[in-house]
């Protein structure tokens, strides 16, 4: 990827709402070029535009990453269940002895415990590991450092 493209991506990662005119001033790339590149990136590179939220300010104080190892015959059913569940922020297929890792967001710890109990009753869970998230130290910062470009 060209240095010009990486400069645009870098600025989009830091602030996707930045006006293109401001980005043009910061990158020394013409607005028309940035606009054209953005259209190309939206077709091929950008998955979705989104907003990072402080969930605790909405009353959701408990977050956890949970890894599940599930019996082969329940794998697809569990995947479908996790993908539909409203309290699951992210679902990943992983390796090293586990099948899925999720980021779950609930109001309190008891809610997560109830959720995992329900999962263990509905599906043949062979193992699970829960890691409660205490504090975000760094999040969504890959390719946001202007010093690289």
Image (cartoon, rainbow, N blue to C red):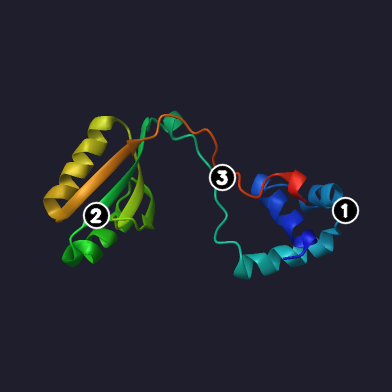
Quadrant in the picture for the N terminus: bottom right
Q: Determine whether label 2 and label 1 are within 8 Å by CB.
A: no
Q: Which of marks 3 and 1 precedes in the sequence? A: 1
Q: Residue at x 34, y 51 (%)?
A: 101
The dot on residue 28 is 1
Q: Is residue 132 above or below residue 149?
A: above
Quick check: 55 left or right of 48?
left
Q: Position of residue 20 (x, y in %)?
A: 78, 53
Quick check: 146 left or right of 16?
right
Q: Residue furthest left?
A: 121
Q: Determine whether label 2 and label 3 are within 8 Å by CB.
A: no
Distance Cα–Cα, label 2 vs label 3:
27 Å
Q: Position of residue 74 (x, y in %)?
A: 18, 63
Distance Cα–Cα, label 2 vs label 1:
50 Å
Q: Which of marks 1 and 2 precedes in the sequence? A: 1
Q: Which of marks 3 and 2 precedes in the sequence? A: 2
Q: Which residue is mark 2?
A: 69
Q: Position of residue 7 (x, y in %)?
A: 76, 54
Mark 3 surroundings within 10 Å by alpha-carbon count, few (fewer than 14), some (14 through 19), many (20 or more): few
Q: Which residue is mark 3?
A: 140
Q: Secondary structure at mark 3?
A: loop
Q: Residue at x 61, y 48 (%)?
A: 142
Quick check: 28 left or right of 74?
right
Q: Nearer the viewer, residue 71 or 91?
A: 71
Mark in front: 2 vs 1? 2
Q: Is residue 126 above or below residue 80?
A: above
């Amino acid at each position: 990827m060209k240095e010009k493209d990486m400069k645009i991506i870098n600025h989009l990662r830091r602030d996707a709402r930045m006006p293109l005119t401001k980005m043009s001033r910061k990158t020394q790339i013409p607005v028309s070029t940035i606009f054209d590149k953005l259209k190309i990136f939206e077709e091929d590179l950008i998955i979705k535009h989104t907003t990072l939220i402080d969930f605790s300010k909405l009353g959701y104080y408990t977050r956890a990453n949970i890894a599940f190892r599930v019996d082969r015959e329940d794998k697809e059913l569990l995947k479908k269940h996790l993908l539909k569940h409203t309290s699951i922020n992210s679902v990943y297929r992983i390796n090293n002895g586990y099948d899925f890792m999720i980021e779950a967001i609930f109001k309190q710890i008891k809610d997560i415990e109830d959720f995992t109990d329900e999962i263990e009753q509905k599906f043949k869970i062979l193992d699970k590991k829960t890691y409660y998230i205490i504090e975000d130290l760094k999040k969504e910062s890959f390719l946001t450092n202007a010093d690289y470009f």
